[in-house]
Image: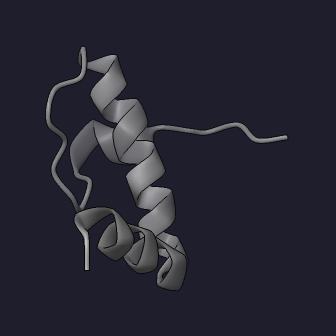
């Protein structure tokens, strides 16, 4: 299984992980694309996302 297929399956079967991954991308972007570890901690957990 490729890494992309593994990641896609992991996110599809665990919706809470998908949301955390999306928030982690935003946290990384705020720090000029630095690595963001999961599970999120500190101020990264306070990021609010808008949808709709």
Q: Give coordinates of residue 29: x percent, y percent.
A: 34, 23
Report the residue that reaches farthest toward the front. Answer: 1
Q: Quadrant of the C terminus?
A: top right
Task: Count every numbered label the image shows and give the total.
Answer: 0
At x 76%, y 41%, the residue is 51
Taking the spot 48% from the left edge, 64% from the top edge, the residue there is 18
Determine the residue located farthest toward the bottom in the rendered image: 13
Question: With 2 as the anchor, is 19 left or right in this view?
Answer: right
Image location of residue 42, percent across then percent down? 23, 44
The residue lying toward the viewer, choosing from 5 and 12, is: 5
Residue positioned 38% across, 38% down in the render: 25
User: Does 18 sit left or right of 40 as displayed?
Assistant: right
Tell me the residue at 41%/70% (across/down): 17
Identify whether 38 is placed above or below 25: below
The image shows residue 39 at horizontal and vertical percentages of 23, 62
Which x, y percent locates residue 3? 24, 66
**Residue 44 figure quarter:** top left
- The colour scheme used to paint the residues is one colour
Residue located farthest toward the top when viewing the structure as drawn:
32
Question: In which quadrant will I find the N terminus?
Answer: bottom left
């Amino acid at each position: 299984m490729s890494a992309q297929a593994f990641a896609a399956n992991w996110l599809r079967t665990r919706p809470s992980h998908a949301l955390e991954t999306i928030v982690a991308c935003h946290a990384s972007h705020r720090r000029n694309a630095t690595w963001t570890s999961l599970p999120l901690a500190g101020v990264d957990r306070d990021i609010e996302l808008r949808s709709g």
